């Protein structure tokens, strides 16, 4: 990321320092990413978090429709055996995916 998410959240006034500290502690205890910890704590609205993640990474926000309603056909682009252990799932159809039928 081009900037630390925690620093941006405090700098932009999205969250107080203490809330970010609690989220970082939660991240250490339970694992996962800071954004996940913040969402689990209900510390920040998801839309506000997307804005901050975009600033931190330098990447555009994802299309909201993809986040709310992934394509039901997208699952055909991935080998279920690969995605189940990590609990990943595709959100767009990619029938020519390099991961399809990969062993």
Image: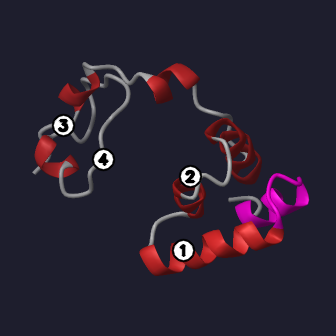
Write the residue at 77% across / 73% down: 18
The magenta stretch spans which residues?
5-16
Do the CB atoms of the residues marked 1 and 3 lie less than 8 Å apart? Answer: no
Choose between 70 and 101: the one closer to the eye. Answer: 70
Spatial separation of the CA atoms under disc 3 and disc 2: 31 Å
Q: Which circle, 4 or 2, is nearer the viewer?
A: 2
Do the CB atoms of the residues marked 4 and 1 lie less than 8 Å apart? Answer: no
- Label count reads 4
Spatial separation of the CA atoms under disc 4 and disc 2: 18 Å
Circle number at residue 91: none
Q: Position of residue 71 (x, y in %)?
A: 34, 20
Q: Position of residue 12 (x, y in %)?
A: 88, 53
| Lower sequence index among marks 3 and 2 | 2
Find numbered disc 4 in the image and state the secondary structure of the residue it sits on: loop
Crowding around mark 4 (Cα neighbors within 10 Å: few <14, some 14 to 19, many 20+) is: few
Question: Which residue position is annotated with label 3?
Answer: 100
Do the CB atoms of the residues marked 1 and 2 lie less than 8 Å apart? Answer: no
Question: Which residue position is annotated with label 1?
Answer: 26
Question: Which residue position is annotated with label 2?
Answer: 39
Choose between 80 and 22: the one closer to the eye. Answer: 22
| Lower sequence index among marks 4 and 1 | 1
Circle number at residue 88: 4
Q: Which colour assignment does the render follow?
A: secondary structure
Side (left or right) of 30 relative to 10: left
Find numbered disc 2 in the image and state the secondary structure of the residue it sits on: helix
| Lower sequence index among marks 1 and 3 | 1
Which quadrant of the structure image shows residue 45? top right
Q: Position of residue 37 (x, y in %)?
A: 54, 62
Q: Which circle, 4 or 1, is nearer the viewer?
A: 1
């Amino acid at each position: 990321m081009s900037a630390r998410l925690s620093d941006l959240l405090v700098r932009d006034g999205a969250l107080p320092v203490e809330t970010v500290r609690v989220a970082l502690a939660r991240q250490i205890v339970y694992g996962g990413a800071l954004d996940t910890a913040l969402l689990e704590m209900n510390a920040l609205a998801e839309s506000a978090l997307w804005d901050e993640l975009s600033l931190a990474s330098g990447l555009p926000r994802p299309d909201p429709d993809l986040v709310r309603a992934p394509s039901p056909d997208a699952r055909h682009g991935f080998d279920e055996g690969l995605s189940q252990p990590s609990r990943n799932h595709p959100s767009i159809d990619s029938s020519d995916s390099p991961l399809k039928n990969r062993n």
